[in-house]
Amino acid sequence: RPTRGLRHPVPCVGREFDGNDRDRLAGDLLMALGHALAMGYRPMSGGLLGPELLTNGDFASDTVWVKGSTWTISAGVASVNAPAAVSLLSQSLSLTVGAMYQVQITLSAYTSGSCTLRFTNAGSAVGGGPTFLAAGTYIEYMTLGGVADSFSVRAPNALAVYSIDNVSLRRVS
């Protein structure tokens, strides 16, 4: 009976499974899951997360990000305030076609409008991305379907009035 990595031998061989067996097995599973999470495994993505790809994702300074109309970065947040037309907040990156990426974003001070995440190439969308319509912290997975040179947050029109506290982008391997 293989028991490597488990604290207890495989339960109930030759006898009926009981509550003690259930508790030991549950403890072993929780221990294994804890180790996997500590190593960066994320069950929903199916893989390990690579290093952070965005610079200044906490908006600690007004640097790195290319700001479209009405975007500002100040006091640790990026804010958009009713652009007359589509406005992007973008950062140039080296991205891999066909790769899956995990994005985590905290949308705060939400008043109205939509916040859409996109991979872009020369400002044009490369495939779709998730759209958010309320304040909150979100984790989404995006697969890059074509050549892209940037990661962007898209504010579509004058209805877009909100702030972003943090954004993170990591490749799933």
Image (cartoon, rainbow, N blue to C red):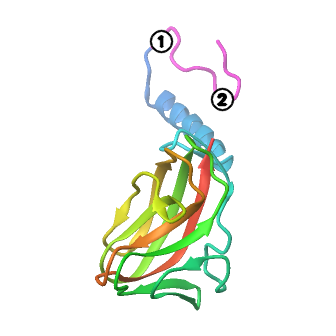
Of helix, strand and loop, which mostly describes the magenta segment?
A: loop
Disc 2 target residue: 6
Q: Residue at x 47, y 72 (%)?
A: 106
Q: Which of 66 and 99 is in front in this view?
A: 66
Disc 1 target residue: 15
Q: Which residue is drawn at 42% across and 70% down?
A: 154
Q: In which quarter of the image is the N terminus?
A: top right
Q: Considering the numbered disc 1 on the image, is that residue within a helix, a strand or a loop?
A: loop
84 sits left or right of 138 in the view: left
Vertically, is 142 above or below 11? below
Q: Nearer the viewer, residue 36 or 163?
A: 163
Q: In which quarter of the image is the C terminus?
A: top right
Vertically, is 22 above or below 67? above
Residue 49 is situated, as x and y percent measured from the top left of the image, at 63, 49
Vertically, is 168 above or below 166? above
Q: Residue at x 43, y 84 (%)?
A: 80
Q: What residue type is labelled 2?
A: Leu
115 in magenta: no
* In the image, farthest residue toward the top: 14
User: Which stretch appears magenta?
Assistant: 1-15
7 in magenta: yes
Q: What residue type is labelled 1?
A: Arg
Residue 131 is situated, as x and y percent measured from the top left of the image, at 35, 63
Specify the quadrant of the image occupied by residue 172.
top right
Specify the quadrant of the image occupied by residue 129.
bottom left
Q: Distance between the Cα atoms at labels 1 and 2?
A: 20 Å
Counting residues from the start of the chain, the first of labels 1 and 2 encountered is 2
21 sits left or right of 56 in the view: left
Q: Residue 146 carries which label?
A: none
